[in-house]
Image: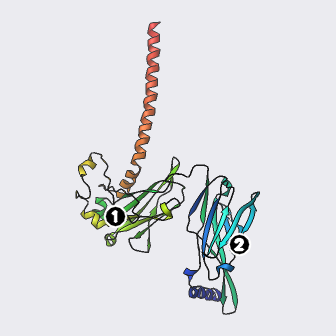
Amino acid sequence: MALPEAILFSSLWAFGLGQLKSEQHEISVTGVRDKSVVISCKVSSQDFSNEYIHWYRHKPNQGMEHLVYVVTAPAPKNLGGKKNKIEARKDVRTSTSTLNIRFLEKEDEATYYCAWWFLIWVESLWNYYIKIFGDGTKLVVTDRSLDGDMSPKPTIFLPSIDEINLHEAGTHLCLLEKFFPDVIKVYWKEKNGNRVLESQQGNIIKTNDTYMKFSWLTVTKKSMDNELVCIVKHEKNKRGTDQEILFPSIENNKRGIDQESLFPSIENNKRGIDQEILFPSINKEVTTHACVKKGSDSLQLQLTNTCACYTYLLLLLKSLVYFVIISFCVCRRTAVCGHGKSS
C-alpha cells in the first residue's frame, strides 16, 4: 500500500467507516406507466444542509449516468423530451434527499443511486474526496394494477430425518411465492444474532404474473441448538418492514419429530394428506408451513416437495391433451370404417 493510500485508510478508519453512509432502504419502487414515483436516500453527514447530493441511474449493459444534483432549492431537469421529468429535493430535518420521477415509461426502468462527496484532510498535505454511494433502488414500471397483496408468501421446509441422523447436519429451506415485483433480498441470521450466515439462493422464477424464489441454509452439528431466522426484504411487505421467519432448532425438531404434539397424524401424511403446522414467527402476521419427510437426499426431496404441485398440474394438462388427441383419432377412424361398410 502506497503512503498516501495508507494515510487515507487510517484517516477513514479514524473518522469511522460506519458513519459514511448513503442509505437507500427501498430495494425497489414500482410505478404505473404515466404516473410518478419518489425514490429516497438518507445521508449520514455532519453538515447535510450544505452537501451536494447527486443522483445517478444505471441501466443493464450501460455505464452510470449522472442525472441531477441538489444543494438547497429543488432541482428539476428535463429528460427524454419531457419537461421537469425528474426533480431532486432535500429535507434538512430528516437528512433525506428524494428523486421524483414523472411521466413514467418503460425506458425509465433502471437502478437509481444517490451519492455525495466527502472531503478528507490528510496532514495538510492532500485534500482527498471520496464519493459515498447508496445501495441503489430499482425502478419497475408496469401497466398492471398494484392493488392486492403482492408480498412474498413463505413456506418453510425443515431438515429430513435421514440428513440429521446420517450427516449430523440439517438443511432449512424457505420458499417464497406469489410476489411482485421480482426484486427481492433473502438472507439468514441466528435468532437474536447480528451476523449474516452463508446461505444458498435459488433463481427467481416467474409463475403466471407473479414470481417465486427459494433460499436454503445448511447447519452443522455444533449449531443445531440455534433457532434461525430467514429475513425477506421486499417492496410489498406489510407496513414496509422485513419479514422475519423463524425456524426451530434442529435438536428441538429432532426430539419432537415423531410426537403427535408436532404432527397430529403421521398416517395421514402417508395417505397423501398434507400436514400444515404453524410455527411462531418474529413477525406475527407471517404464516409458515412445515413439512418433514424421510429421504436419502434431503435437498432433492425438499425441492421435489416444493415443485410437486406445479409438476402435478403439468402432468394433468399433458394427460388431458393426450386424451383429446386419442379420442379424436378413434372417433375419426370409427366414422371412416362405418362409412366404408355402408357403401
Residue 278 image point, x, y percent: 33, 58
For label 2, the crowd category at 10 Å Cα-Cα, with few meaning under 14, some 14 to 19 and many 20 or more, is: many
| Residue found at x 56% / y 84% | 16
Q: Which amino acid is tagged 2?
A: Val
Percent position (x, y) of residue 101? 67, 61
- The crowd level at tag 1 (other Cα within 10 Å; few <14, some 14-19, many 20+) is many
Residue 104 image-quadrant placement: bottom right
Per the model, the C-alpha gap separating discs 2 and 1 is 51 Å
Look at discs 2 and 1 and give the one toward the viewer: 2
Residue 70 disc label: 2
Q: Is residue 168 visible?
A: no
Which residue is rendered at x = 69% and y = 68% of the image?
88
Q: Residue at x 31, y 61 (%)?
A: 163
Whole-percent x, y for residue 135 in the image: 58, 69
Q: Which mark is residue 111?
A: none
Residue placed under numbered mark 1 in the picture = 170
Query: Is 72 drawn above or below residue 229 in the view shown?
Result: below
Q: Secondary structure at mark 1?
A: strand
Observer-nearest of 25 and 48:
48
